[in-house]
Image (cartoon, grey):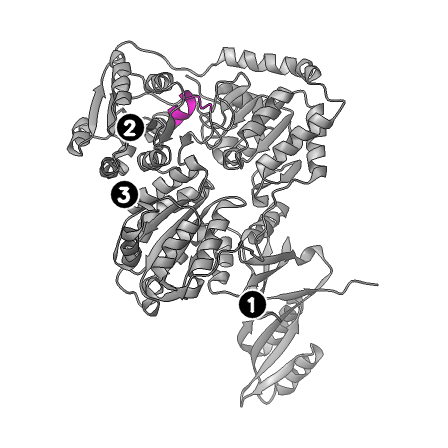
Amino acid sequence: MRHTISVLLQNKPGVLSRVTGLFSGRGFNIESLSVAQTLDPEVSCLTLVTSGDDMIIEQITKQLHKLIDAIKVTDMSEHDYVEREMALIRVKAEAHTRAEVLRVIDIFRGKVIDVGPKSYVVEVTGKDSKIQAVIDILRPIGIQEIVRCGTIAMTRAKKS
Amino acid sequence: MKLTGAQAFIKCLEEHGVEVIFGYPGGAIIDIYDELMKCDTVKHVLTRHEQAAVHAADAYGRVKGEVGVALVTSGPGATNAVTGIASAYLDSIPMVVFTGQVPTMLIGNDAFQEVDIVGITRPVTKHNYLVKDAKDLVPTIREAFHLARTGRPGPVLIDLPKDVLATLIKYPEPKPVKMRTYKPTYEPHPGQIEKACLELLKAKRPVIYAGGGVINSNAFEDLTELAKKLNIPVTMTLMGLGGFPGTDSLSLGMLGMHGTYFANMAVANCDYLLAVGSRFDDRVTGRVDAFAPKAKIVHIDIDPASISKNVRVDIPIVADCKHALIAMNTWFDRNKDFDANARVEINRPWHEQIKDWKNKHPLGYVEETDIIKPQFVVQKLHELTGGNAIITTEVGQNQMWAAQFYHFNHPRHFMTSGGLGVMGYGFPAAIGAQMAAPDKVVIDIAGDGSIQMNIQELATARQEKLPVKVAILNNGYLGMVRQWQELFYDKKYSQTVMEVVPDFVKVAEAYGAVGLRATKPSEVEPVIMEALRTDNTVFMDFVVAREEGVYPMVPAGKATTEMLLV
């Protein structure tokens, strides 16, 4: 099963390689990864998506927790949470397809962030499934390049 | 007053009560060696290879129950140390290893003798550091000692660039280490202790399976108390030997691949398994689904990641073994309904069953009159040292025979590379052990193959005038691999025949040590007696039965009940 795991880490050199080394060394799988500083500049937040049965996920969270530089490990899948990915897509936009591209992007609430003579760069955010849907629809029009970032996630506010 | 980094380093070792370190000098670490010469509180033992320095520090720490310290230079010094570090990591041995490094401004330049040792050792250390700023030096060393000895112990490496050792700094005042992200759990959860105890009261066929954590947490007495109070048989892992008296009637000896028949049968048939400071290693469990299949499993471990890693556990207890065992003992002492005599009655059929297994297949071998059996040598060593020697081993058959036939009655008396299985561990470990316990008899039980992996340490032993004894079980083979080839590879002895074996007596003599040889069973005792009388380093070359095997044996991947017997 797919799990999104969020790890707060000390913001120090080499910390990322401790995490990735743990995954490669123990044969765990990383589907996506994203890291950046938090409000506290000494702490960074790493979000990763992985998959495995319960025993593997339990090992992953325990091993992550065991890293001396790890402050907190949260398996988001145990909580109510929101998650987002972003993709930048360079799509062919010639005279006869420009309007079509704009319409599709509008439907998915994306943005055109660069305009060239024969292409647009569009920005789309959302869940993994939404990004995939945009890609599927734009593909016949002509996608020239895609850059996607890893998933980021946050727990929802507690109700009441 | 300001100190150089190198001076602060020495002062910080003194602050931590370090008396002996093991190492090998080189260009990048020369500043520390310069300071060591002026220092009379820290004794440096010069080994003849960096790997040996780390193994010696490992065993020194194990015997003393303290943090072992090794010091090596950059580049090849550091890479040579890696095997020793990995061995300590897999055996959870507290250790701090210092490596020299090229000056900070050269790091990343592929400078002479530069290697990214922090990168290389990341997966085999509990934690590691590169000190880039001299003001971080002392706090980093303090943190490293704290990490090495607390929680699940392990090796910590600190990489020291040459310029950091020459920089002048103010020595920071000692203060307790506080780490935001590291707080191991020592005290068990009382609810879990109660659950474990209640289940134990229901058990008719209980077994304790004790590992290295018992030794690490000094829980020998507490484990013995619990086992005796409740009349529970105890089996030990290789790392756990000495955690419970091996000659006690409740001892089942070692379990697993080369464990006793009765230990493996007891675990396979128990209804309650108390795992204490052990980690369900594949050499212990065999086929996982056939390991203690009928049992409620309770697992005490300070490392939560060890729990339910290989085998699903019913009652996990995250705690220091000693604290958890004290809590269990206290629970039974306070429980008015608990009746020790009633336990004996309830468990009687179980103990009779075990006695039956013991009678059916005791640990043994076929004795011969004209040829020395390796097991006989170990038995004789046990007998003639009163079972009180510190034993180290290499890896392979020698290690298993030592584990099976030297019935360890005391903790911190058996040093072996259990997890990584390093040939070449035993001799430097014996040197470290003898440094830690100068008045003890220290014997390395070795094979003719593995002794050659660190045989150069004869020079170290001689230089320090250590009366270390090495018992070489010389069969002219890499015996354990040969045994596998005999059993599973149609007796094709590919590269396991040692066609050239040196004359170990002459090798010993070349270093100024004593060499003795026994070729007949009647010579074994006189050779051992002479070795024990000698206060020099001694090699005992026992020419043993060439194709003797280690039995029982559970073939890899089989259930532990599917043993090949003598």
Write down the residue under mark 1: A42
- Res. B495 visible in picture: no
* Number of the front mark, 3 or 2: 3
Q: Position of residue A115 (x, y in %)?
A: 57, 88
Q: Secondary structure at mark 1?
A: loop
- Name the residue at the right extreme: A160
Q: Judge left or right: residue B168 versus residue A38.
A: left
Q: Are marks 3 and 1 on the same chain?
A: no
Q: Are marks 3 and 2 on the same chain?
A: yes
Label 1 amino acid? Glu
Q: What range is drawn magenta here?
A: B400-409
Q: Judge left or right: residue B214 versus residue B326.
A: left
Pointer 2 indicates a residue of which chain? B
Q: CA distance from mark 1 to mark 2?
A: 52 Å
Write down the residue under mark 2: B470
Above or below — where is B97 with respect to B252? below
